[in-house]
Image (cartoon, rainbow, N blue to C red):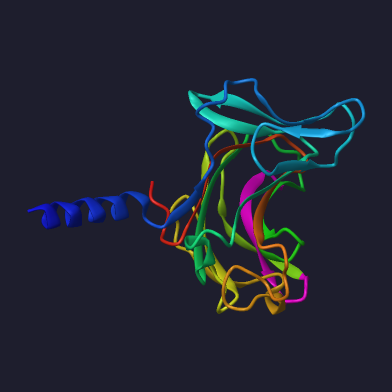
């Protein structure tokens, strides 16, 4: 009986965690909390572990906690790139050759004909896998995905559309053996086999060749309008809702 109960509990735990090794957690931070900021000397401080921003100009607030229709989120200020390296190779799930990511973003307003924001998945040293762009062009707002040549150059391909003022869910599946990724927007059919930007640097897991610092990072950039983020998760299995 005890053995059976142990097996049931183990299966329940496995189902609950589902290989997930990172999720953005804002529950203990009140709206108005300044996540990343600089003082008068340009020295940076952060309320979340391993978070930073660029540029680091004096007296700048890069991101604050806010609520949008009852949903707690990060508001990343226009002109700021928010950087996070929240885990390392010490996490077994983070060593897998296939990694799933999910991010929920919102843009309330967008200037015409420019990149409004972007989400980037990469190593701390700048070797990048996938870039996801939020664009506004000729009155249309859409999500674009980078398709690289393996050496740093990318061309942008259409992945889906988003609406201003509404949450957009972007799911990404990164395959570090094939050095490609799939991207889906709001549950749409996935745009498959987009090549990594720096494919030649990767060797079969999410860790690149000859990298001493085993930290993986994601960046969120607010180019020409504030970008709101309510969910970020990474998992060795498809991210559950």
What residue is shown at x 86% (from left), y 38% (from top)? 56
Of residue 33 and residue 89, the one placed in the foreground of this image is 89
Q: Residue furthest right?
A: 41
Name the spot of residue 202 as percent of width and height, x first.
66, 75
Of residue 213 and residue 151, the one placed in the foreground of this image is 213
Answer whether residue 78 is visible to the viewer in this image. Answer: yes
- In the displayed structure, does residue 158 sit left or right of residue 115? left
Name the spot of residue 155 as percent of width and height, x first.
72, 68
Is 171 magenta? The answer is: no
Q: Magenta region: which residues? A: 132-153
- Classify 33 as above or below 148: above
Task: Name the chief secondary structure element in magenta.
Answer: strand
Of residue 168 and residue 28, the one placed in the foreground of this image is 28
- Classify 59 as above or below 213: above
- In the displayed structure, does residue 170 sit left or right of residue 197? left
What residue is shown at x 29% (from left), y 51% (from top)? 13
Image quadrant where residue 45 sits: top right
Of residue 81 and residue 105, the one placed in the foreground of this image is 81
Name the spot of residue 89 as percent of width and height, x first.
58, 62
Q: Residue furthest front?
A: 2
Is 134 magenta? The answer is: yes
Answer whether residue 108 is visible to the viewer in this image. Answer: no
What residue is shown at x 51% (from left), y 49% (from top)? 22
Name the spot of residue 221 as percent of width and height, x first.
72, 45
- Classify 59 as above or below 156: above
- Classify 149 as above or below 88: below
């Amino acid at each position: 009986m005890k053995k059976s109960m142990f097996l049931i509990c183990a299966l329940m735990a496995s189902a609950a965690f589902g290989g997930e090794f990172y999720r953005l957690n804002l529950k203990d931070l009140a709206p108005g909390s300044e996540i990343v900021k600089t003082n008068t000397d340009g020295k940076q401080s952060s309320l979340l572990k391993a978070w930073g921003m660029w540029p680091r100009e004096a007296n700048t607030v890069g991101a604050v906690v806010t609520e949008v229709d009852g949903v707690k989120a990060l508001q990343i200020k226009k002109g700021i790139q928010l950087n996070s390296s929240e885990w390392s190779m010490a996490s077994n799930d983070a060593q897998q050759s296939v990694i799933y990511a999910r991010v929920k973003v919102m843009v309330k307003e967008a200037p015409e004909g420019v990149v409004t924001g972007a989400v980037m998945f990469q190593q701390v040293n700048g070797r990048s896998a996938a870039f996801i762009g939020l664009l506004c062009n000729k009155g249309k707002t859409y999500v674009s995905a980078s398709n690289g040549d393996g050496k740093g150059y990318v061309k942008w391909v259409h992945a889906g559309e988003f609406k201003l003022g509404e949450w957009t869910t972007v799911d990404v599946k990164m395959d570090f053996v094939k050095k490609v990724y799939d991207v889906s927007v709001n549950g749409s059919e996935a745009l498959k086999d987009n090549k990594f930007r720096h494919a030649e640097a990767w060797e079969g897991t999410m860790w690149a060749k000859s990298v001493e610092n085993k930290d993986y990072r994601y960046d969120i950039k607010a180019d020409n309008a504030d970008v709101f983020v309510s969910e970020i998760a990474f998992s060795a299995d498809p991210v559950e809702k």
